[in-house]
Amino acid sequence: MRPAITLYFVLFIGSLWASNGNRIEGKVLDGATHSPLAGATVFLEGPGLQAITDQLGTFRFDRLSPGSYRLTVRFLGYAVNSRELKVPESESTTLITVPLEP
């Protein structure tokens, strides 16, 4: 009986871990040339998360609760871009493109 309970517990926890929940994925681009900006700082207010864009200008925030968030992107030499995002109730990925103006 005990091994069955242990197995159930492990499978249950594993299924919770496998569920990614909601996600925000995006790309930060130069507003004039549309080139990706690597090294831009992306803040997600609410949970207080931060990411740095990769060489392709992409970033990602995982395991987010449904609700409204403020996303702010900063990069030296560019104007700050800030916007409100809504994360839906259902598990999903919100895709955005953030242009920064020099």
Image: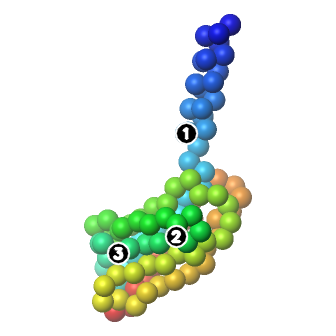
Sooner in the amino-acid sequence: mark 1 or mark 3: 1
Q: Residue at x 64, y 21 (%)?
A: 8
Q: Are marks 1 and 3 in contact (CB under 8 Å)?
A: no
Residue type pointed to by label 2: Leu
Q: Which residue is drawn at 60% across and 78% down?
A: 84
Q: Name the residue under label 3.
A: 40
Residue at the top extreme, as displayed = 1
**Figure check: 45 above or below 82:** above
Q: Where is residue 50 in the image (x, y as percent from the top left)?
A: 44, 66
Q: Give the position of the C terminus as an image quadrant.
A: bottom left
Q: Residues within 10 Å of mark 1 (few under 14, many from 20)?
A: few
Q: Which residue is drawn at 57% across and 64% down?
A: 47
Q: Give the position of the N terminus as an image quadrant.
A: top right
Q: Residues within 10 Å of mark 3 (few under 14, many from 20)?
A: many
Q: Is residue 73 visible?
A: yes
Residue type pointed to by label 3: Ala
Q: Position of residue 29 (x, y in %)?
A: 37, 79
Q: Can residue 36 be seen in this view?
A: no
Snapshot quadrant of residue 100 = bottom left
**Gap in Å between the C-alphas at discs 1 and 3?**
29 Å
Q: Residues within 10 Å of mark 2 (few under 14, many from 20)?
A: some
Q: Which residue is drawn at 35% across and 68% down?
A: 53
Q: Which SS class for mark 2?
A: strand
Which mark identifies residue 66? none
Which mark identifies residue 44? 2
Residue type pointed to by label 1: Ala
Q: Mark 1 points at which residue?
A: 18
Q: Which SS class for mark 3?
A: loop
Q: Where is residue 87 in the image (x, y as percent from the top left)?
A: 64, 65
